[in-house]
Image: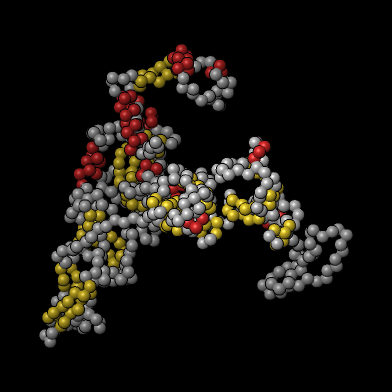
Amino acid sequence: MSAIITDQLRILNAKSFVAAATSTANSFYSFIGLPNATDYSPTWDVNPPAPKDSFEQENDCWDTIIALKKITDSDVRQVVRKNVWSSGTTYDMYRHDISRTNTSKPSGATSLYSANYYVLNSDYRVYICLQNGTDPDNPEGRPSLDEPTFTDLEPRSAGTSNDGYIWKYLYTIKPSELVKFDSTNFIPVPRDWETSSDNSEVRTHASATDQIKIVTITNRGVGLGTANRTYTGVPVKGDGSGAEVTIVVGNDSKVSSVSVSKGGTGYSYGSSGIGTEATIDIIVGQGSSVIDFEIKNLGYGYGQGQILTVRSGGSTGIPTNTAYAFEEFKILIDKTYEDSFSAWTVGDLEVLDDISDLFDGVQRAFPIKFNDEFKTIRAKKGSNIDIKATLLIFLNDILQVPGQAYRFDTGSIIEFSEAPKNGDTCKIIFYKGTGSVDVINADILETIKKGDDITLNSDNYSYQEEERTVNLVVSSDIVKTNAYGGVGISTDETFAKAITWCRQTEDKFINGKPVAKDRTSYEPLIQPLSNIISDIGISTNAIYVESVKTFFDSSKENIQIGVILAAP
């Protein structure tokens, strides 16, 4: 049974090893030995032999130890990949939802631990990137221009370049740990991060706030609110409460910026935005006051506590003439309602041709067709896809189990364990997944062709057949030949024989039609060329070349060519 070794399991194994190595109940040593290395390999220094992991080799290691050093708790640390901050590099930002189907940008990492979301600065301080400049105009982030150097607890930008980056300080590597554990590819992480007092301020601040700190604009919207207006106190929807943002709408009635005004509490995620599409009919009385109104469309995206109003001035505003004093018409949103749902798609299913008319109670093997054309289903080389699992086969409306009720090893032939009877019904469905992504239709260059000769061979002389001619290539692994009634025939459809294939060497007539011996692979690649012997400009309407004599002409030919004119 296969298993997935998750990142969390790797971390647990690393922690378990560190705990064992630093426990007073255990004693770990590093040692040097093997003074006669050439006894094992003359090229030990450049090509060390692979360990045999045997008791003999273990005993030999004990015999050749010449010095040991006990490993103490100060000699062991967990490490992570070393990412040194560099100006102009676009880093990933921390996200909890990085996966194979939702990769990190721009690295394309499929897990958080393989993403480049943290950096080491020149002062050996470690930071994580909470925002890398991602917005609708830069969906994969922007290059980092300011090196983070601060040690504040609050996330913030590192400089004044407006590169869009927000960094969070984590810890500083101690000089004593640099000496022991810093390397070209790895840096140490703090010991006992969950309990150590060295980084308690950073740890406590991060775990106690549960606030919204970062906002990423994923869609600027169209025709939102009022142009050139700042919306304050816009609530954040999520699993916490109390968070608010300030949204600025630009000249184009699109969101230009969003900033956090209140972080709230208890959040692990959140979303916000300006509502849109709400419409209202207003009746204004003779006293120039609103006497009645009716909400025609509730719209969407609005937050509780927001205040809605209507335009002022113009042909649609109230009042139409803003020179008069007036009190703005406002509607307070008291409650909002929303529904959540999840969805998934099974992918594309393709119904293959019905083969029920071929059932006779004897035949067990049947080729698959689609739109009356023979088809072969193949998995890409190196793919883990099981071709048998891509077919759903129903006999008399009963789903058949692959490998038991039928075999589909070749990708072209369905071979039932028992011959279906005349009158049985069959439905074959091909699961294509995401059809335009997971499956491609390809026409292959035929190796064997109509007119070739084949012979089915067997070590048992009684099953050795004579030569026959191919009259149809059915699929990538099926051909039809002339009717054969000679020796060597077996009634066992699963009996496999070796094949001798001979290419067609002369033109033939098959079923009354001529079949030439030429093949696509025999087609010559003719690429004639000649040198241009005159200058060519914008107004040139003739090109003079050295010769147009084809390179494959006989040397005895003497073709005289005058002036060659060619339309540009």
Instruction: Decide which of 139, 6 is in the foreground and name it.
Output: 6
Instruction: Farthest residue to the bottom: give it.
Output: 286
Where on the picture, by quarter, is residue 261? bottom left
Instruction: Please determine whether, in this image, residue 89 is positioned above or below residue 436.
Output: above
Say left or right for 23 vs 109: left
Q: Position of residue 173 (x, y in %)?
A: 34, 35
- How far across and how far down the image is residue 108, in percent? 42, 49
Q: Is 551 left, or right, of 451 in this rendering?
A: right
Instruction: Give the residue at x 83% y 71%.
Output: 562
Left or right relative to 498: residue 422 = left
In which quadrant of the rendered image does the N terminus lie? top left
Q: Is residue 188 visible?
A: no
Residue at (61%, 52%) from the top-left corner?
479
Indicate the quadrant containing the C terminus: top left, top right, bottom left or bottom right.
Answer: bottom right
Q: Position of residue 511 (x, y in %)?
A: 68, 60
Query: Along the line of sight, which residue is nearer the eye, 54 or 263?
Result: 54
Q: Who is closer to the viewer here, 384 or 390? A: 390
